Amino acid sequence: MFQRTVLALAALLSVATMTHAAAPGKASKAKSAPEGFTVLFNGSDFTGWHGEQTMDPRKVHALKGEAKEKFLKDGAEDLKKHWRVADGIIINDGQGAYLTTDKAYGDVELLVDFKIGPKGDSGVYMKGTPQIQIWDFTEPSYARNGADKGSGGLWNNAAGDPGKDPLVVADRPIGEWNTFRIIMVGERVTVYLNDKLVVNHARLANYWNRKLPLPPHGRIQLQTHDHEVQWRGIAVREIAADEANKILASHGNAGYESIFDGKELAGWKGAVANYEVKDGAIRCRPHTGGVLYHEKELSDFAARVEFKLPPAGNNGLAIRYPGEGDTAYVGMCELQVLDDGDKTYRGHIDPRQAHGSAYGMVAAHRGYLRPVGQWNFEEVTVKGSTIKVELNGTQILDADLSKVKEFMANSAHPGKDRTSGYFGFAGHGDAVEFRAVQIKPLP
């Protein structure tokens, strides 16, 4: 748990009862990493790690000059005071800065062993954000905070949110080693504790600013929280884009139907002549455009699609398109599909034109596109006047278009209140590609 009061007496009892290291003559060596993983703790010292006071990772990233030097110096001093390595095990006395990876990570699979004593309390921060919870599930005084449900939950998620509480109690007896296997794609976290699923693809809330998504990259941290904790067997595997897309597609896929067979444009209308099927994907022909839309009219729905952008590529998702006209204005909206980091657009577009934005109306959060040439995974949910966009596992837009009163360039969007229409692609002359196009009507 993060920033809650723990009695000093409990801390003293924990220190008194916790075993500080492996017994003499039974030294534990650093685990070798499974294939594809990189060992993060070498069993001897803190190479690849540093001490860091807990703080919003965006603010840490913004530190410059003397402020950054002081921040790192304070963390280094705390690390020396409160962290040590003995017999191949990392030991923290419950105080001081958090042990933090030097490297910031995006999509990863993380393995880590931990051991706590009575009233133990700690956690693992992903992308510098609290947290995957560790605590003494047998301690009666912790039960009011949910400890009796076990470790592994996303404790700082809001009450009732998926992942807040673990699915099962999977902790081993206090004083024994436990193992986390954590899979993180975007904001989506899956946690196995001792080979049991305790969190299933839940969004990790941004504790630091709940209005913002998690940063696309961030450091892994081991929390200090008044009680001694031991760590070993820490290894990480970075997840490539194609695997990340498969992970995202494998969750919550019930009810989705494919509307593109990867071979031809049967069932599609509109600017059919301006699109082609190439290598299993729908591609806008260069220097053409217009709206290509699927024949089935929809009201509330969810859509999933993978897309790939060329440099400076520009297209869009037509939402509740009426079948003619400019979908950005006569449809509910055009959701931008845009390489907004290209120099062509950098500093030259309105925020409401960035990728994932409801064009001209509501800006999406930026920085979550994969590099040009890689496939991105996007999920769109349309309910009533609301629309959500999740890009590569991170929610970048959550908007209610009925509340929009100001428009880019003062150009009205008369279609924003439409209750039904077609789903499609709004080409702008660039060879943007789409595949794995799926629709799920919502009740």
Image: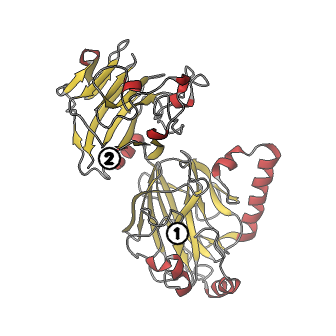
Instruction: Write the residue at 43% across / 47% down.
Output: 393
Q: Quadrant of the N terminus?
A: bottom right
Q: Residue furthest left?
A: 266
Q: Is residue 136 visible?
A: no
Q: What secondary structure is found at the residue carrying circle 1?
A: strand
Instruction: Write the residue at 48% across / 73% down.
Output: 151
Q: What residue would you read off at disc 1?
A: 133
- Which amino acid type is shown beneath numbered disc 2? Ala
Image quadrant in which you'd find residue 13: bottom right
- Compared to residue 28, the image places residue 316 above or below, namely above
- Compared to residue 433, the image places residue 126 above or below, namely below
Q: Nearer the viewer, residue 349 or 301?
A: 301
Image quadrant in which you'd find residue 198: bottom left
Instruction: Write the residue at 28% across / 50% down.
Output: 253
Of callouts 1 and 2, the N-terminal one: 1
Instruction: Write the residue at 56% across / 50% down.
Output: 211
- Which amino acid type is shown beneath numbered disc 1? Gln
Q: Is residue 299 left or right of residue 316?
A: left
- Compared to residue 28, the image places residue 303 above or below, namely above
> Which label is found at residue 249?
2
